[in-house]
Image: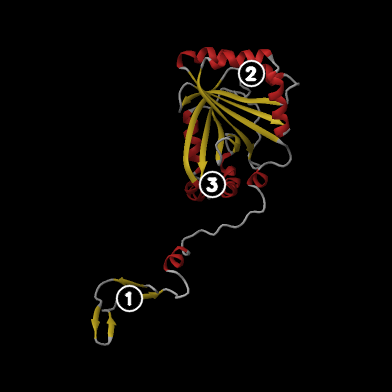
Amino acid sequence: MAARVLQRVGKGLKQTKNGLHTNGQVTVLVRSLSGFGEDSWIKSLFVRKVDPRKDAHSHLLAKKEDNNLYKIQFHNVKPECLDDYNELCAEILPTIHADPEYPCELVGTWNTWYGEQDQAVHLWRYRGGYPALTEVMSKLRQNKEFTDYRKERGKMLLSRRNQLLLEFSFWNEPVPRPGPNIYELRSYQLRPGTMIEWGNYWARAIEFRQQNQEAVGGFFSQIGRLYTVHHLWAYKDLQSRENTRNLAWQHDGWDEVVYYTVPLIQNMESRIMIPMKNSPLK
């Protein structure tokens, strides 16, 4: 049955024998179309229309001039083992990075300072994509020094997880930089289906965050926890971080980016990280 929605605006509505009258107020009477169900007609006013996509968001957002794949590792270390763990990583990881037989590079390696404690974060780049990753993993299984490292490392860890990532086309490629710096890894869990929107807004927003050369790299997940975005920033210290982030609000358009991207986020996390002594990102 067709529904009637009567909206009364203001006061003074009274019934007479000739119908409804108001004392200078407005009365709106809306009758739904008989050809539509009550629920479907109302819902159609609020449902966001989504354009069909002809390609995966990874093809639309990732860099096309190279074929880089990234792996980010999160290792939660037993507190009493953190120093030994750092020494073990400093001994083994740079040798893999420097060996031309392995088509991979250690982009950066850190300990979390603020955020999840007693944690190490490692970021690797594989030039050549998935075939390069497969080649490295196959060779490392035959590398006795590395297998011994993994066994010793396993005694020191509480848990570990990783993700495979692609880099956004509009971000810088991470390159070694001198220090000392602190690094912030801001991780965003997006609502499924919103990665294209995020990329469209941040393709403009990144221009507002380049003045102090703080932008290091931007990535989105392909394997592991999906619809995750990682933004990596470098600052001289915490006060520099505060000043740089406040400066962004002086740019026309930054407030709009924040306004439209916040609803895309399910949850977010910030880590302040200190580079380990052999990290290429100092």
Query: Which of these two is toward me, 6 or 181?
Result: 6
User: Which part of the image, by quadrant, shows the N terminus?
Assistant: bottom left
Q: Identify the residue at image location x=53%, y=32%.
A: 185
Q: Identify the residue at image location x=44%, y=75%.
A: 34
> In the rendering, at what x and y percent does residue 87 appear?
57, 13
Q: Which residue is mark 1?
A: 26
| In this rendering, the label closer to the viewer, 2 or 3 | 3
> In the rendering, at what x and y percent does residue 153 appear?
56, 16
Secondary structure at badge 1 equals: strand
Q: Give the mark nearest the N terminus, 1 or 2.
A: 1
Which amino acid, mark 2?
Leu
Q: What is the quadrant of residue 70 in the picture?
A: top right
> In the rendering, at what x and y percent does residue 250 appear?
50, 45
Which amino acid, mark 3?
Pro
Q: Which residue is mark 2?
A: 93
Q: Which residue is mark 3?
A: 192
Query: Which of these two is toward me, 31 or 138?
Result: 138
